[in-house]
Amino acid sequence: MLEEYTTLFREGSDEYIVQKSRFICDARPVRTEEEALGFLNERKKLYRDATHHCYAYVVGENAGVIRYSDDGEPGGTAGLPMMEVIRARQVVNCCVVITRYFGGILLGAGGLVRAYSHSCALALSSAGLARMTLSRRLLAAVPYSMWDRVSYLLKSLPVQVEDTAFGTEVEVTFLVRLRDAETVERTLFQQTSGQWEALTVEEMYAPWREETPG
């Protein structure tokens, strides 16, 4: 099992216009090829009067399924350049669809490659990238007398707080990467004078946001 892989943080959309041609740039995280094709069909129905619906998708943490299409554009000017952008970012479990409305001015092969590459980069940037990392979800019950200290520590540690419930004690649920778990728990234990105790709820892949180059 991979320790981590990169995928889309959420669904994203942007738009790019060059030489009067309009490029609608859409991206969505997907887990299966059926989901990718479903996303493509959604875009085709939404923009049914568009000239082209070019796409590229990668499914599987190990990139087991790779598909792309020029959808009528000159061979190698749309789908492959889009896939090269996805590969360069090492993104998997994602589908990008670029919808083009032809503006009446021919872009030429080089212009098309640049337009589709840029449009794909815009789609990825809009969706944002996440590192899906093997993580542990922890649940801790914290006495109110300790909450200020624990709250401060959680803000300074490499964790994601998911939920905080205030009852007889403060119940806090948070994520920590497996590689950081021992250090985080040791820090919390030491900084609370040994009063820290947390229950492991589950271990799974969880998204950790990373910056996307434009």
Image (cartoon, grey):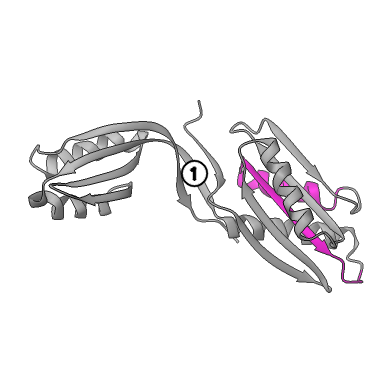
Q: Quadrant of residue 178?
A: top left
Task: Point out residue 61 in the picture as x, y percentages from the top left corner.
Answer: 58, 33
Q: Relative to 15, is 31 above or below?
A: above
Task: Point out residue 201 in the picture as x, y percentages from the top left corner.
Answer: 31, 33
Task: Point out residue 205 in the picture as x, y percentages from the top left corner.
Answer: 45, 36
Q: Quadrant of residue 185?
A: top left
Q: Is 207 colored magenta in this rendering?
A: no
User: Which residue is tagged 1?
Assistant: 131
In the image shown, does 42 or 95 lie closer to the viewer? 42
- Residues drawn in magenta: 76-105
Q: Relative to 13, is 138 above or below?
A: above
What amino acid is found at the position of numbered circle 1 in the picture?
Answer: Arg
| Label 1 residue SS | strand
Task: Point out residue 138 in the picture as x, y percentages from the top left corner.
Answer: 29, 37
Q: Residue at x 51, y 29 (%)?
A: 2
Q: Residue at x 65, y 57 (%)?
A: 123
Is residue 174 shown left or right of residue 70?
left
Is residue 58 shown left or right of residue 208?
right
Q: Relative to 201, is 8 above or below?
A: below
